[in-house]
Image: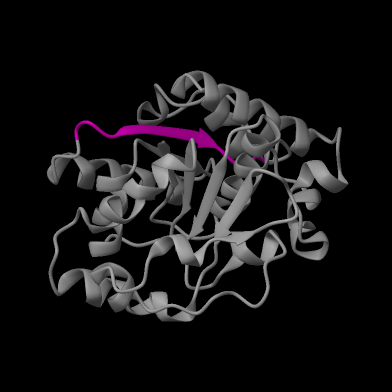
């Protein structure tokens, strides 16, 4: 099982929309896919139409008293399941700090490899014990970056932190997201990408009202706005990512 963590230190850059749309495309191409919504806000669970999530608490989950396999919930799409968010995840940092090391999330995910070929983690915007556990569990860190100075700065902070903490084996793939070609700064940055974006993905995801409508439709964009620029872009992003992972 390959694990993709959709992450950025900065909030509001489109992590959840990316995670949900990639998971949907993976399932469409017959990859048995699990999306784990690690953000206490639970936006990914909401987008996938999951209500009445199974309540769980980080302590019993991390200790093994509550098997992770019992938390999986079906979505209305074949081959796509979700571990919904729970508000108690706000305490996950505390529980991870109490012991067990940064490999706890990886140990939880390992048994799932028998059932899934792909796990996508929708991550909260934090540099914390949760982030360290995510980095240790992931094969790829997928980083949506808006072409603005603050978003670039946040990504550079993440990159420097990974280097400092010696996560050298983690593949980091940034890509430009929420691009508005009416804005001069956006055009300048995608035309001449900053050095930190080199080696990232080539797909550019446009700013689109269709992304905002995911909350209204509670579905990935390809379900209700097929053929739009945003839907095509996420499809291209999936194929580029799948090629990188040899899926």
Q: Is residue 109 left or right of residue 48?
A: left
For the residue pair 90 and 202, the one nearer the viewer reads as 90
Above or below, 91 against 162 in this view is: below
| Total marks placed | 0
Q: How is the image coloured?
A: one colour
Residue 166 relative to residue 114: left or right: left
Q: Is residue 174 magenta?
A: yes
The part of the chain drawn in magenta is: 168-179
Q: Position of residue 104 (x, y in %)?
A: 23, 58
Residue 178 visible in the current orientation? no
Q: Nearer the viewer, residue 175 or 138?
A: 138
Q: Residue at x 67, y 43 (%)?
A: 24
Please indicate whether residue 109 sits to the left or right of residue 4 in the image. left
- Between residue 47 and residue 8, name the one nearer to us: 47
**Residue at 53% of width from left, 49% of height from top?**
34
The image quadrant where one finds the N terminus is top left
Whether residue 79 appears in magenta in the rendering, the answer is no
The image shows residue 43, relative to residue 16, as above or below, that is below
- Residue 177, position as x, y percentages in the image: 59, 41
- Residue 233 position, x and y percent, is 70, 31
Please say whether residue 27 is visible from this viewpoint. yes
- Residue visible at 61% across and 64% down in the picture: 45
């Amino acid at each position: 099982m390959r694990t993709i963590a959709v992450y950025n230190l900065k909030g509001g850059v489109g992590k959840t929309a990316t995670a949900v749309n990639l998971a949907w495309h993976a399932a469409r191409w017959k990859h048995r896919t699990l999306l784990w919504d690690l953000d206490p806000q639970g936006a990914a669970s909401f987008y996938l139409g999951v209500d009445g999530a199974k309540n769980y608490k980080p302590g019993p989950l991390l200790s093994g008293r509550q098997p992770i396999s019992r938390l999986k919930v079906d979505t209305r799409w074949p081959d796509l399941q979700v571990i919904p968010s729970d508000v108690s995840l706000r305490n996950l940092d505390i529980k991870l700090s109490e012991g067990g090391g940064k490999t706890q999330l990886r140990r939880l995910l390992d048994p799932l490899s028998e059932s899934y070929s792909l796990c996508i983690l929708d991550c909260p915007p934090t540099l914390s014990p949760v982030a360290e556990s995510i980095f240790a569990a992931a094969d790829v860190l997928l980083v949506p970056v808006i072409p603005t100075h603050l978003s670039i700065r946040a990504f550079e902070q993440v990159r420097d932190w990974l280097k400092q903490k010696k996560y050298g084996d983690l593949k980091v793939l940034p890509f430009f997201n929420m691009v508005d070609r009416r804005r001069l700064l956006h055009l300048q940055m995608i035309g001449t990408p900053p050095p930190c974006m080199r080696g990232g993905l080539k797909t550019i995801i446009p700013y689109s009202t269709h992304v905002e409508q995911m909350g209204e439709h509670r579905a990935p964009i390809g379900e209700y706005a097929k053929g739009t620029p945003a839907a095509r872009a996420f499809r291209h992003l999936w194929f580029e990512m799948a090629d990188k992972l040899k899926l």
